[in-house]
Image (cartoon, rainbow, N blue to C red):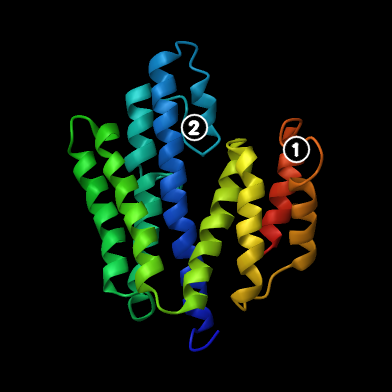
C-alpha cells in the first residue's frame, strides 16, 4: 500500500462509491422520470421508494427530492457532496485536476437546481463524472489508489443493482472487474463472502430466474466483502 494511510484508503474507497452512486442513481432517476411521463399507472413510484425517497409526494416534488433533497442520503445532492468531501482530503493522492471534475459535477447540479428544465441539465453531471473517471486514470499516479477507487465503483454498482433489481445482467462483468483488482489493493476483505457472492452470480438461471430473496442474500454477502 506504499504511503497510503488507512484513513486515505477509506476515503479512496468511498470516493469511488459516492461518485458511482451519483452516476448510477442519476441514470436510474432519469429513466424513472421518462417512465413517469409515459406510464399513467405510476408503477415507477415504487422504484424511487426502493431508493429511500418519499413516493407519496406529487411527481414534481418527488423528482425535486431525488435530485436536490437533503433528507434522503440517496439524493444526487448528498451523493455528490459526499464524493467531494472525500476528494478534497485526497488532494496529494489524486491531484487537483481530478478533484476539479467532482467540483464541476457539484456546480452542474447547482446550475440544474436553478434551471427550468433540471432533469435535462443534469445530463451535464454525467459528463463531469465520466471526465472524473478518465482523469483519475490519467492523473492518479499511484496504482493502488487508482484501483481502490475502481473497486469502489464496482462495489457501489453491485449494491445498487441488487437493491433495485436493476441491470442484473451486468453483475457478472462487475464481479470480474472486482476480482481482478481486489488482491492488488492490499485491503483485507472477506474471501469467503466474496466466493459465495461469485457462486451466486455465476449460478445457472441467474439473473433470469432470480427471486427477491436470492437478491437479498447476495446483497448480504456483498456487504460483508469489505
On the rendered structure, is 79 left or right of 149?
A: left
What residue is at 74 percent from the left and 67 percent from the top?
Answer: 190
Disc with the residue nearer the chain's start (1 vs 2): 2
Find residue 134 and name its label. Answer: none
In the depicted structure, whether residue 139 falls above or below residue 222 = below
Give coordinates of residue 187: x percent, y percent. 62, 76
Q: Closer to us: mark 1 or mark 2?
A: 1
- Taking depth in this image into account, of 64 and 12 the one nearest to the observer is 12
Residue topped by disc 2: 48
The residue at 39%/32% (across/down) is 30
**Would residue 128 be found to the left or right of residue 21 on screen?**
left
**In what element is the residue under mark 1?**
loop
Q: Secondary structure at mark 2?
A: helix
Q: Is residue 86 visible?
A: no
Q: Quadrant of residue 175?
A: bottom right
Is residue 107 found left or right of 160 in the rendered image?
Answer: left
Task: State which quarter of the image contains the N terminus.
Answer: bottom right
Residue 207 vs residue 53, the one in the foreground? 207
Residue 222 x %, y %: 68, 55
Relative to 49, residue 174 above or below: below
Give above or below for 212 relative to 14: above
Q: Is residue 47 visible?
A: yes
Residue 64 placement, left or right of 112: right
**CA–CA distance in space, label 1 to label 2:** 24 Å
Given residues 60 and 158, the one toward you in this image is 158
Instruction: Tell me where residue 179 appears, x and y as whole percent.
Output: 67, 63
Q: Residue at x 66, y 73 (%)?
A: 183
- Residue hosting label 1: 206
Residue 151 x %, y %: 56, 63
Q: Residue at x 37, y 23 (%)?
A: 59
Amino acid at each position: 500500500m506504499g504511503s497510503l494511510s488507512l484513513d486515505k484508503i477509506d476515503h479512496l474507497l468511498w470516493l469511488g462509491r459516492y461518485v458511482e452512486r451519483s452516476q448510477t442513481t442519476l441514470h436510474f432517476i432519469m429513466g424513472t422520470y421518462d417512465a413517469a411521463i409515459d406510464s399513467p399507472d405510476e408503477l415507477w413510484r415504487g422504484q424511487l421508494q426502493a431508493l429511500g425517497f418519499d413516493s407519496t409526494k406529487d411527481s414534481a416534488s418527488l423528482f425535486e427530492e431525488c435530485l436536490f433533497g437533503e433528507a434522503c442520503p440517496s439524493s444526487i445532492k448528498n451523493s455528490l457532496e459526499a464524493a467531494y468531501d472525500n476528494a478534497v482530503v485526497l488532494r496529494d493522492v489524486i491531484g487537483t485536476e481530478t478533484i476539479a471534475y467532482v467540483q464541476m459535477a457539484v456546480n452542474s447540479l447547482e446550475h440544474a437546481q436553478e434551471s427550468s428544465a433540471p432533469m435535462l441539465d443534469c445530463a451535464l453531471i454525467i459528463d463531469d463524472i465520466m471526465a472524473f473517471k478518465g482523469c483519475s486514470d490519467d492523473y492518479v499516479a499511484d496504482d493502488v489508489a487508482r484501483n481502490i477507487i475502481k473497486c469502489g465503483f464496482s462495489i457501489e454498482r453491485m449494491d445498487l443493482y441488487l437493491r433495485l433489481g436493476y441491470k442484473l445482467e451486468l453483475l457478472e462483468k462487475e464481479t470480474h472487474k472486482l476480482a481482478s483488482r481486489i488482491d492488488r489493493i492490499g485491503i483485507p476483505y472477506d474471501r469467503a463472502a466474496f466466493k459465495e457472492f461469485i457462486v451466486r452470480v455465476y449460478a445457472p438461471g441467474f439473473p433470469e430466474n432470480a427471486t427477491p430473496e436470492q437478491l437479498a442474500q447476495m446483497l448480504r454477502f456483498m456487504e460483508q466483502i469489505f
